[in-house]
Image: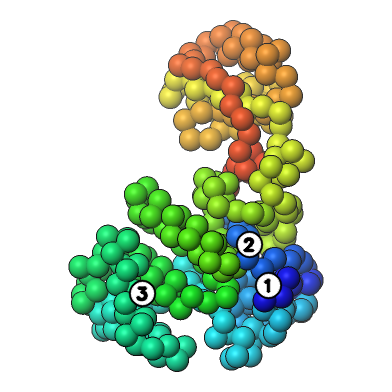
Amino acid sequence: MSESAIIIRDVSKSYNGFVALNSVSFTVKSGEVYVVLGPNGAGKSTLFNIIAGVMKPSSGSVNVLGGNPLDPSTRLKISYLPPTPPLYPWLTVMENIDFYASLYGFNKNTVRQEAAGLLETLGIRNLSNKLTSKLSTGQSKLASIVLALVAKSELLILDEPTTGLDPGMRKSIIDLLRKQVSNKTTILMATHLIDEAEELANRVAIMDRGRMIAEGSVEELKKLHAPSAVLVIKPSKEHLEKASNVLRERWSRAYRINDEVRLHTEDPDENMPKAILMLSENGIRISSVSVDKPTLEDVFLKLTGRRLME
């Protein structure tokens, strides 16, 4: 296996004048977990389709496992799981696995044994003989994960693999992916979920509006782009919007996230009492104030001024 599994240089993709990717460049090392983090519409799926050989770039060069992903011999080394489970609804779960295994030229009995173990691990072995058209959204997602893992490919490409899953299912998937890493499989994964990126990634690339805007390990990204600390202020529900506006008048980096306001600061000890006083003077009730360590969400906020889920 070469030192670099993926080499992307100045890759762009346009559709009828719309620029989905704008001169994207990065390298993924063999055997690492490389997570692409970004909101919907950032260009992640377009990028992954190009790397998997599903589509051609408008410009730029793509090298995957030492070859061109448009070459069938290279594609046989890749397992690609798109956001929508690629299951044939008129086949059972195991029949889907048999079909895809036949495309790779695998031994049917060996693959079935491997698949049965994975289905057992995910708690869905009882679904192996069920038509995939009868599966729930979560069950379809889990079955497609098995489909991607059973091939034991050199490169595993996962586009939002845990979206729509409950926390227990997500944990099972993350645990399975850790085993793949120990087997020296290179993993390229797209997500908008902060905890997955922080837990799994060797390196993270942050995408926004078709561009790669930052790259590095989780700690490198926080060191370079995150504040020293975050004040987490939870005002009463009816005062949430007002609290955000009041704090933003004094601090430009105050962001409303769900039911709280996250205030980026380099000096929390000095700014906490000032923030509490300002809110009190404006008649805003506060349920709690705490100091938090920055996350990759805060990195994205600082780089773009927007949150990942917008």
Mark 2 or mark 3, whichever is nearer to me: 3
Q: Residue at x 50, y 57 (%)?
A: 178
Q: CA distance from mark 2 to mark 3?
A: 23 Å
Observer-nearest residue: 208 or 5?
5
Picture coordinates of residue 114 (x, y %)? Answer: 36, 74
Q: Quadrant of the N terminus?
A: bottom right
The three-letter code of the residue at mark 2 reads Glu
Q: Is residue 245 visible?
A: no
Q: Which residue is mark 2?
A: 32
The three-letter code of the residue at mark 3 reads Glu
Sequence-first tag of 2 and 3: 2
Picture coordinates of residue 188 (x, y %)? Answer: 59, 65
Q: CA distance from mark 1 to mark 3?
A: 25 Å
Q: Which residue is mark 3?
A: 114
Q: Is residue 280 left or right of residue 299?
A: left
- Work out whether 255 lies above or below 25: above
Contact (Cβ within 8 Å) of mark 1 with mark 2: yes
Q: Which residue is mark 1?
A: 5
Sequence-first tag of 1 and 2: 1
Observer-nearest residue: 220 or 226?
220
Q: Is residue 101 left or right of residue 155?
A: left
Q: Is residue 3 visible?
A: yes
Estimate how packed mark 3 is, as few (under 14), some (14 to 19) or many (20 or more) residues with alpha carbons within 10 Å.
some
